[in-house]
Amino acid sequence: MLENLKEELVKLHQKLVENHLVVWTGGNVSARDPESGLIVIKASGIPYEGMGPQHMVVMDKNGKVVEGKFKPSSDVYSHLYIYKNREDVNGVVHTHSNYATAFAALGRSIPVVLTAMADEFGCEIPCAGFVRIGDEAIGKEVVDHIGSSSACLLQNHGVFTIGKNAEAAVKSAVMTEDIAKTVWLAMQMGKPLPISDEDVEKLHYRYTHIYGQ
């Protein structure tokens, strides 16, 4: 079931590898099918090399496995919490990408000091608190702290991103790491200059309403 969505998730997981956002078996992408409400997520501990549709697990909103012979990702309950509390979200990504996670290790949000960040996020990328893995606590931290952003850092942990679909969430994860790297580089030379709230708002509006085809 949901074979097209499984195929898409396999390709999107490879995007995480191509953009150096994950290593070994870490990280995951999930998607919610808007029609059925079912959620598809990567199985736990599956290497990216050789990953296929058979390694995707289909679940209902309460975490019951509907199809799949593997255990779902250990982050599944956090994903489910986000879906339950954000009806506008149909894609969730989790990574431990290096530069963004370095900010998370310090418990620091990423400030809006780049026009690319104003474009994509329209605000800072917040850093939520520390919670242990295994239940929906991480999902709650994300929902409570992400605000209008599509990305949220988790203290001492990593990155969660959301989107209207899984592809949008992956794009947000790629952009989060790219921005985090540039901001970190700028911090090595001095104190990055903030962009005013007014300019951030105008840049974000242009990008989301005018830019592109």
Image (cartoon, helix red, strand yellow):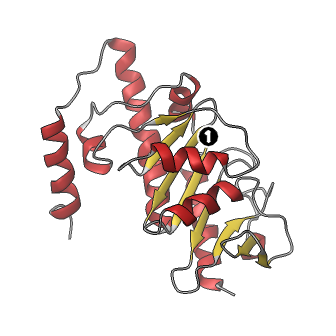
Q: Nearer the viewer, residue 134 or 161?
A: 134
Q: Quadrant of residue 41?
A: bottom right
Location of the C terminus by quadrant is: bottom left
Q: Position of residue 162 (x, y in %)?
A: 48, 57
Give the residue at x 57% y 39%: 97
- Residue at image mark 1: 96
Q: Nearer the viewer, residue 166 or 48?
A: 166
Location of the N terminus by quadrant is: bottom right
Q: Is residue 129 visible?
A: yes
Image position of 22 (left or right of 190): right
Q: Position of residue 14 (x, y in %)?
A: 61, 60
Give the residue at x 37% y 28%: 183
Relative vertical location of residue 131 with respect to residue 187 in this rendering, above or below: below
Q: Is residue 20 visible?
A: no
Give the residue at x 30% y 14%: 191
Name the amino acid type tagged 1: His
Image position of 77 (left or right of 122): right
Q: Nearer the viewer, residue 141 or 70?
A: 141
Q: Position of residue 168 (x, y in %)?
A: 43, 62
Secondary-structure class at tag 1: loop
Give the residue at x 30% y 41%: 123
Q: Position of residue 137 (x, y in %)?
A: 66, 46
Q: Quadrant of residue 63?
A: bottom right
Q: Determine the residue located farthest toward the right in the rendered image.
A: 69
